Image (cartoon, helix red, strand yellow):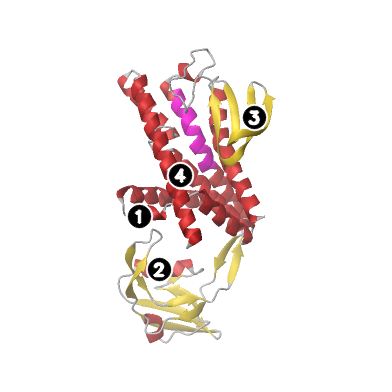
Amino acid sequence: MGILISLIVLSLLVFFHELGHFSAAKFFGVKVEVFSVGFGKKLYSRMIGDTQWSFSLIPLGGYVKMKGQDDANPLVKSYDNDSYNIKKPWQKIIILLAGPFANFLLAFVLYIIIAFSGVPKILPQIGEIAPGSAAFEAKLQKNDKIVAIDNQPILYWEDIGQAIEKNDDSLILSIKRDGASRIITLTPKYIVDKNIFNEEVKRKVIGVKPLGSQVTIHMNPIEAVEFASTQTKNATLLITKGVEKLITGAVPSDQVGGVVSIVDITSKASENGFVMLLFFAALISVNLGVLNLLPIPALDGGHIMFNLYEMITKKAPSEAVLYKLTLVGWTLLIGLMFLGLYNDINRLIG
């Protein structure tokens, strides 16, 4: 069941990406010949207007084929009135940007739904205390509730780390213990930890873990928009930073995941409830948006670069160069797909 949900989620994310391209193309009068969710052999097709809408065998992507535009063979051209080729470079760029934009917009909407459905928040109540830590030495106890740090109110567990990072010296903790208020002063200690990219970083800690009790926060419309904006921005920065670190070698290539990893994690997210599934779907949607903007020929970002070149130089790239760069782009993409699959298989074996 989890795998089926994963494939449905991926198909929906791809559908919205391609719907962005489709909508912009139709706006500028470009004929869309095929709108396909999935690749390979067509399982179901239906003509609606002048577009063939299809579901294909391999549900791991999708495409829209506009008249006069073919990623498999960039030398195929058409100069009819309803062709992609006759459009101005800025119009083509909008058509190309519309796909990634649809992914960012979808993520924003998903975060809005999450905000209305209820965001789980862990309460700032201490569960475990590490021996020898600052909290241990200050005699903090299990079930203590941290209500403020340096007079900054602490509502949820995530607020604790933010408050600790703001202060370079000792901290004044206001806590609740057995219904009574107490003031405790302690100095955080530095530890070497791993960040989300598996890099070693120094960070300040007081040595506590949460008890695990949580509340569900339902937001009003203004709070929901602010939450969705922040989450979409943070997800975009996170994925962009990850791509940058992968390119520079800061993150090793064995950390690249493929479609098996995506399906596996989406399946596990679905087992942890509707909200968790929406969180991961929003993250994957942002991921699709960011990756498609990379300046790789055969991706939206690569085509945008070609059109920017034409806008600046007032002439299109030569067909020979365009063809060779597209082949390089496809080679790189296929190589990344196989690398992700190879890493996925290794993780499964491991």
- Amino acid under disc 1: Pro
Q: Residues within 10 Å of mark 4 (few under 14, many from 20)?
A: some
Q: Give 349 or 80, whichever is nearer the viewer.
A: 349
Q: Picture coordinates of residue 258 (x, y %)?
A: 48, 49
- Amino acid under disc 2: Ala
Q: Of the residues under marks 2 and 1, which one precedes in the sequence?
A: 2
Q: Picture coordinates of residue 315 (x, y %)?
A: 33, 18
Q: Residues within 10 Å of mark 2 (few under 14, many from 20)?
A: some
Q: Of the residues under marks 2 and 4, which one precedes in the sequence?
A: 2
Task: Calculate the distance from the C-alpha at mark 4 to the C-alpha at mark 3.
Answer: 26 Å
- Does residue 98 show up? yes
Task: Calculate the distance from the C-alpha at mark 2 to the C-alpha at mark 1.
Answer: 32 Å
Residue linked to disc 3 = 53
Residue linked to disc 4 = 337
- Amino acid under disc 4: Met
Residue linked to disc 1 = 252
